[in-house]
Amino acid sequence: MTLLTVPIAAKSLKEAASQIKAAAKAGAEMLELRADYLEDLSTSLVEKLMLQAKSANLPIIVTPRDSKQGGANEYPDKLRIDVFVAAIKAGADFIDFEFENFSGQNQEAITKTLSENSKSRLILSAHNFETKFDDIKKLYSQIKEAYSDAIPKLVYTANHINDCFDAFDLLHEIKDDLITFCMGQAGLISRIIAKKLNSFVTFASIDDKTATASGQLTIENFKNLYRYDSISSDTKLYGIIGSPVAHSLSPLIHNACFADIGVNKLYLPLLIEGGKDEFNTFMQNVLERDWLGFKGFSVTIPHKRNAIDLARDNKGLVEPLTEKIGAANTLIIDEPKVSVYNTDYAGALDAVISTLGIAKSDFADMSIAVMGAGGVARAIVAGLHDAKAKVTIYNRTVEKGEKLAAEFGCSFLPLDDLLDVDAQLFINCTSIGMHPNVDASPLPKSCLHKDMAVFDTVYNPPNTLLLKQAGQIGAKTVNGLEMFINQALAQFKLFTGKNPDLKLMQKILYDRLF
């Protein structure tokens, strides 16, 4: 069992009372009283804090953290030990003490009090705020040797998502009570799937302001976005691979649609920084650990080509259309092989066709300007080429733009020539204008005219500055949200074999973005 634990990081008893009430109401399964946050810490203050916390009828951890291990205030060891003793006598279910300080008089005082109060258990914690531990298994063994009944807590910063697998492996191998996860954005998934891997606890904040560590999610996100209550050891994992991914709304829609059809699946944001080597290392880590339960991924920049190369090397399926496009946006694991697909192609063309009220045949001989030469641009250019449109590619990197144009028999012009663009349809395939840089536009307003339709593949925000300016002069516009929905529908079918509820997906996105 994994207990969703909410830290109470308050400076005063009044503030603590408010946080305790909010945590219990939000669905906390345990409280951690971070006594190091209290001003003028004393044993009597902690005893009063314990009385407040007991009103929630939840298990309680008391933690007066050493400032050198992330504590909010610098309190002497003697006071902290006195606080531990008072907390145990007041009925704390758990106390959390630093392993590096667990020796000499500290150890004697804590173990003596624990022996006299059998209800309380000791958590011995180690933190590395810079990088992963040199040998996490050895550190675990050292903690158990120091106090066999302790619950080891091993928390470290993941500088890359691949650093998380040390924690996953330890949780998989150890069947006793253990807490381990990673801090930082790269370690986010370790907090979410802690329940799947049976970590003794995982931590969630009441809100962003009360978070006590880097990468800590709110309890609302745990419960609603990531369906915490539905996670089990059998949960199958999916996610969006890319860099960046924090802005992505894919977890929101896929998790909601998983819940709607009643499948035990979870969709995660998977920040994979770096290039092909880092991507391949992640996929190797996943494929070597079938017990993790990863079954499929959405793939975005910069890994759309890397996914194809992986499938080829793995002797898996590369969908013919995806082979032609040269970029994948969906990867399915069918052990030991992987298959890759591209749903951007149809998603983009369908968005233009439905919004502008045209037929696919109307693309023939239409003059279309495409800005960008990345994975989305490749899919759209491939589709337009099939539809016999007259496409001109504009890109900052000349070599990349010329290569894409040559592959599909299109024209190429350098980005500076975009100021003289004269096309029936302009398509932005770059991230310019994407949240949070919403005041940027890939094309000056002076270049727009009412007879030019404008399609922006950016979907967050759906009404970008480019589309706003195009609308102001009377031009027809196509937002990236329709493309996003279309490609997500196809991805969901690949993930589950079932069609999602289109209206549900639309409602979720429109409620979030408008």
Image: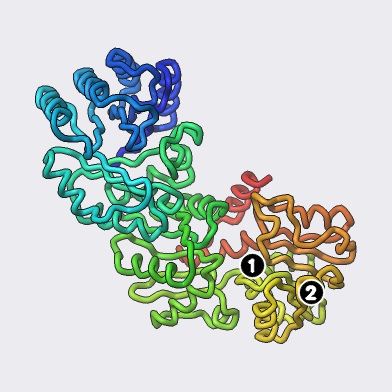
Can residue 404 be seen here? yes
Q: Is residue 30 above or below residue 18?
A: below
Q: Would you say residue 263 is visible in this rendering? A: no
Q: Which residue is mark 1?
A: 347
Q: Looking at the rendering, in which quadrant would you find the N terminus?
A: top left
Q: Are marks 1 and 2 in contact (CB under 8 Å)?
A: no
Vertical placement of residue 288 versus 39, above or below = below
Q: Nearer the viewer, residue 400 or 267?
A: 400
Residue 101 place in picture, x, y as percent: 22, 35
Q: Position of residue 287 (x, y in %)?
A: 34, 69
Residue 410 image point, x, y percent: 73, 83
Closer to the chain start, of discs 1 and 2, is 1
Is 131 placed left or right of 301 in the picture?
Answer: left
- Of 69 and 463, the residue lying toward us: 69
The structure residue drawn at horizontal position 69% and vertical position 45%, both measured from the top left corner, is 514
Q: Which mark is residue 368?
A: 2
Q: How many marks?
A: 2
Image spot of residue 80 (x, y percent): 26, 24
**Marks 1/2: CA distance?**
17 Å
Badge 2 local density, few (<14 within 10 Å), some, or many (20+)?
many
Q: Is residue 278 above or below residue 182?
A: below
SS type, badge 2: strand
The part of the image, by quadrant, that contains residue 320 is bottom right
Q: From the viewer's perspective, is 304 left or right of 197?
A: right
Image height check: is 66 above or below 82?
Answer: below
Determine the secondary structure under disc 1. helix
Q: Kindly identify the residue that appears in the image at 50 percent across and 33 percent down.
A: 209
Q: Mark 1 is on which residue type? A: Gly
Residue at 48 percent of width and 45 percent of height? 225
Q: Which residue appears at 30% of the width and 68% of the height?
A: 288
Local crowd size for mark 1, using a 10 Å CA cut-off: few (<14), some (14–19), many (≥20) = many
